Amino acid sequence: MSRFFTSKYSSLTPYTPGEQPKDLEYVKLNTNESPFAPSPSVAKKVEQEANKLMLYSDPECVDLRKKMSKVFGVKSENIIMTNGSDEVLNFAFMAFADQKNPLIFPDITYGFYPVFAELNGIPYQEIPLKSDFSIDINDYLGKNKTIVIANPNAPTGLLLSLEKIEKIVSSNPQNIVIIDEAYIDFGGESAIKLTEKYDNLLVTGTFSKSRSLAGGRLGFGIANEKIINDLNTIKYSTNPYNVNRLTAAAGKAVLDENDYYLNNCKKIIENREFTKLELENLGFEVLNSSANFLFAKSEKIDGETLYKELKKKGVLVRHFEKERIKNYNRITIGTKEQMETLIQKIKEIFKEKQL
Ligand SMILES: *Cc1c(COP(=O)(O)O)cnc(C)c1O
């Protein structure tokens, strides 16, 4: 740390992104990216757009929001586009939480929530998940606090029904409820349609997981127009050109071929169910995931050892140090071939260690 770093930030613990190694050709099952390349039209549109890079991007993302509007069935005024959904989450924390409106979220969830809370000086409370890692919605009813819930949750993959989400939203009319739907396309029902009924609901989404655009950085928020206006106040006070030209072009091309991405989701779901069965046959306990990853543990081998042994064999999965989940690994669902490799490598490890 330099001697100039302000005391406001000097105790900040930043988010730790999953490894992005450059040395080896890993089977990369650690950061929940799509194993499928974007549809070919994305490269074409991005290349055409490159000729216009001397001009700033459109801060309003007019064309992009028009296409979003068609795909998601809401009006343009109800949409904000951001640099990944991490950005819309940060904007929302800045806009809707403070000392008077502290945050609550589960103890086991997306690691960025406490980081954004600390960055913005927002007090927060972590509500323990039940022993089976599910959310007890009674913990979130009538709280008068700003609530953020990932649905499906990460890294558990567990889904809350739309009915339960609605109960949480309707019981907290004085506060914003943020539903982070990064993984909703892998088996859940979106809460987007509830944004017409509830003016305190913000649904966030991303092109990083189901839409093969993690490296492009494109996310969005959908809510009542007034909420979107507040988020735009934050956006225009930090980075009006947050969505660059190449990413906007890529995003539009993706939305033009929505069926391709929905079909990829189907394949991921099939591969997920295949992998779950295979892991269970090997004695793993696997949570019931509605996302593009599995959360699994084995009595035979602790989480960290399995992670390290798999890495030696060229397969990357995600291990977390947190006490409650340190025996688990989060395994991203890739192609059928990648998942077969994972299972093969686990069998080898068990054999070598005579487990
Ligand atoms: C991946 C992820 C995000 C955001 O990803 P971006 O790449 O910033 O869009 C948000 N929430 C959860 C729970 C995630 O797993």
Image (spheres, helix red, strand yellow):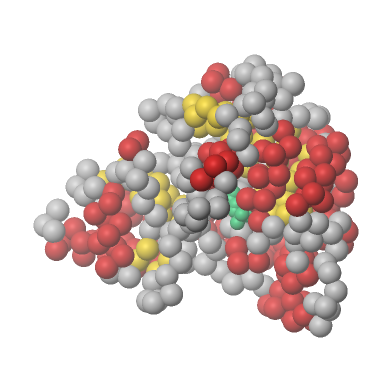
In percent of width and height, residue 6 lies at 57, 46
Residue at 51% x, 45% y is 10
In this picture, is 57 found above or below 76?
below
Task: Pick out the residue farthest to the front.
Answer: 3
In percent of width and height, residue 292 lies at 51, 53
Q: Quadrant of residue 96?
A: top right
Q: Quadrant of residue 222?
A: top right
Residue at 75% x, 66% y is 244
Query: Could you say which is closer to the camera, residue 120 or residue 89?
Result: 120
Residue 30 seen by the camera: yes
Task: Pick out the residue farthest to the top.
Answer: 142
Query: Could you say which is closer to the camera, residue 331 or residue 281?
Result: 331
Count of marks placed on residues: 0
Residue 157 seen by the camera: no
In percent of width and height, residue 298 lies at 26, 46
Using residue 149 as the reference point, say whether residue 133 is left or right of it: left
In this picture, is 17 found above or below 216?
above
Task: Pick out the residue farthest to the left.
Answer: 354
In percent of width and height, residue 221 lies at 74, 46
In this picture, is 53 found above or below 263?
below
Residue at 27% x, 68% y is 312
Using residue 38 as the reference point, say whether residue 125 is left or right of it: left
Query: Could you say which is closer to the camera, residue 12 or residue 143?
Result: 12
Using residue 328 as the reference point, say whether residue 182 is left or right of it: right
Using residue 65 as the reference point, say whether residue 156 is left or right of it: left
Residue at 40% x, 51% y is 330
